[in-house]
Image (tube, grey):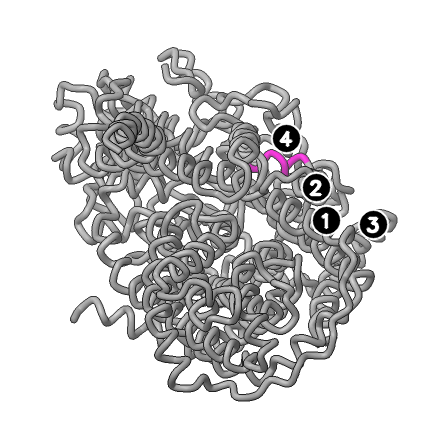
Amino acid sequence: MDFLNPVLNGFVVVLEPMNLLYCLIGVVIGMLIGVLPGLGPAATIAILLPLTYNVEPVTAIIMLAGIFYGAQYGGTITSVLLRLPGEASSVVTVFDGYQMAKQGKAGTALGLASIGSFIGGTASIVGLTFLAPIVASFALDFGPAEYSALALLGILLVATISNGAKTKALIAAAFGLLLATVGRDIFTGESRFTFGSLELADGIDFVPIAMGIFGLGEILYNLEERHRAAKAPSTVTNVWPSRKDLSQASGAIGRGSVLGFFLGILPGGGATIASMASYAMEKKRAKQPERFGKGAPEGVAGPETANNAAATSSFIPLLTLGIPANATMALMFGALLIQGVTPGPQLVEQDPGLFWGVVNSMYIGNILLLIMSLPLVGVFVKILRVRAAILAPVTALITLLGAYTINNSMFDVTLVVVFGIVGYLMKKFGFEPGPLVLAFVLGSLLESSLRRSLLVFGGDPTGFFSRPISATLLAVFVLVAVLPGLRSLLAKRRAATADPATTKIKETV
Amino acid sequence: MMQFPTRRAVLGAASAVTLLALTACGNVAAGSTSSANYPSGPVSLTVGQAPGGSTDLIARAISEGSAKTLGAPVPVVNKPGANGSLATKEVAGKPADGQNLLLINASLITITPLAVAKDEAVNIDDFDVIAGLSQDDYVLVASQGSGFKSIKDLTGAGRNITFGTTGVGTGSQLAQKVLFKQANVQGTDVPFDSGKPALTAVLGNQVEVTTIQLGEAMPQIQAGKIAPLLVFSEQRNSFLPDVPTAKESGFDVPVAQYRAVAAPKGTPKEVKDKLLAAFQETFKSDAYKEFNKKNMLTPKEISGEEVVTQWKDYAAKYKSLVEKYSISLSGTK
């Protein structure tokens, strides 16, 4: 039971009043921005990054994590009541959630979603609690070779799994890789793409890129969209779902927890994909699939459970390996770096207070959300009435001020503006910013780890296969890269063999 | 709900006001020539490294101690970039009125110029050094997998040895490159981003040895996870009295990290005296002494003139060492 000690100490960390307060602030902000369409958790975290600068690292990450999973709750509310998904991860909730609301079962839908979210989130934290020490026990076996393999696999998964057009994702990722090469080569001291500027000597900092693309870019993009005036919400009653609804949804909640947990761990996965996969799965499993889209409780419970489970489990690769699985985690990575904490396998050992403090704060955060989300529904819906003309300039100002305060540098502010325009244009032309940012983070990791491992191996690339962890990761890489091609090949062959059979049947007939 | 934008706005506005206050003070002070009423506002201490590192911690210890004596706040301003060149160039361009100080690392003057382009190098003559602070020693440590227990094991291994460094143009790199040449041992230089990852690589047997700062290595040395082979200081380190110096082991490569506080060139003498007095008051305080001890820093509280002479001597020595053994700090040769 030795390993439970640091876990319990983590609770001591969370229960410090300051940390509890920031946890509460985090989940409330998360719910708020979850309600607001457009402004997502990634943008919010990007904007608030500099404000966490003077706070203790644990406290800062507790708050930022709260924003992330809090947004999963908030997004549901508008999906159900107004048919207006606040978050991408709540889009599928609209199908059945809004139908339920129309049938006067808005309370049931929200109740199911909250209970599902709570169970999914908690299940993921339990998974994280047991998985992290296992990964950490391999911590010192993770050398440059393992990181190269991991980064390679990460970049591949980001490019293949991400939603949206594949080619555009690849282009964005390539741009991210290019940006990662800027700065002084850490192996030779040679300047690359710095154009003689000392400001660029250390490369482009991750934070201004994220603040520009996710923060300013989103704000600019949202200005284009007219805010629909929100109607007063239908009265929400009967929040506690009936026994029948619960039994109908319990299977979906269980499956959503497992599905979300695994999709969240996967690089390139995350809450949105998890919710969509869960909806598809529930519809496929249902005895009467025609009920879906007409107010099926499973259609709300499954995806809402899965998105919260995924939001939580995506912390696993970040906190245990130092590999961000999605764009929001990349921001979390940036936040940790600002605090002087390098996430990786050593984190659990070296900074158990931070690690378990953050993990355990999620239990508390989920309980807070469960308690708050239902009574506050009415309040949150009113937020939709805030005019973009007020919200946008205020957030833009905070973003720019914040960018300055991190390094006291006007150059960073310029970077934020430039990347804000880049982010805006990317959104406008249908490029997802996620692959760019992830490739940027993983690109520099890949380059330095690869060169470092080749130095250690004396230039012999077969060294990657002589180490068990890197060999396994590379095998997975090959599998993921080859699988889609193989599958389509098999499908073709099957079609080819099926053809003569059908003709034969025709003949006999 | 309107509370939220307002709350954020308040925070934002607060930081804006602080910033304005900071910059404004710098400008106002630039106009005044009388050094009698120095300091005329906050005295900013710029650090070319990110918060949390040893340089930053030293700056904060100094700032805390001297603010009381100076009667003005001494905010630490982190401006990381290009090993600290960015911060150095910025402070060099500020008015010489003592309102803007710099905490400078010796390696920036003595070693970095050997690795980077000429126009990126920093010149100590652009500054009036107020006082030297402390010495941060480098220790050569070996992994368990290497089996090295003393420097003899390393020099007698008779094979290529991988050594981790804390980056290009750092004391860690220079010290090891010269040592390997002088010992006539084949080595592969594996640069890491800083001391922490280099230490992790030794702990995980990814590289066989590395040279990092004592404060970083000490917990693992005490835990018996890594073996200290030698220190690169000229005298034995008081925190590690049983470990020989490079000199005792027959190598002529004295390397340590030194730190000093400097002001832009041409700062009035009265201002410099006031600052020096404030720093000396700090040096005497128990809190500062305790800070040095905790971080395994050896006090080296010498005068500004001595700092300049010593650093220039080291710069010249390293230059000749590098030329003698035809070592290039950039590239892999």
Element type at mark 1: helix
Judge left or right: residue A299 versus residue B232: right
The correct choice, above or below, for A271 with respect to A106 in the image is above
Residue lying at 49% horizontally and 65% vertically, measured from the top left = A69
Which image quarter is the C terminus of chain A in? top left
Main SS class of the magenta portion in the image? helix
| Residue B121, horizontal then vertical, whole percent | 59, 25
> Hey, what amino acid is under mark 4?
Leu
Nearest to the observer: residue A429 or residue A388 = A429
Residue A130 painted magenta = no
Judge left or right: residue B269 versus residue B291: right
Q: Residues within 10 Å of mark 3 (few under 14, many from 20)?
A: few
- Residue marked by disc 4: A198
- Residue marked by disc 3: B27
Q: Mark 1, chain letter?
A: A
Nearest to the observer: residue A199 or residue A305 = A305
Q: CA distance from mark 1 to mark 2?
A: 7 Å
Q: Residues within 10 Å of mark 4 (few under 14, many from 20)?
A: some
- Residue marked by disc 1: A221
Q: Are both tags, 3 and 2, on one chain? A: no
Residue lying at 35% horizontally and 79% vertically, measured from the top left = A247
Element type at mark 4: helix
Q: CA distance from mark 4 to mark 1?
A: 32 Å
Q: Are both tags, 4 and 3, on one chain? A: no
Q: Mark 4, chain letter?
A: A
Per the rendered image, the range of residues in magenta is B84-89
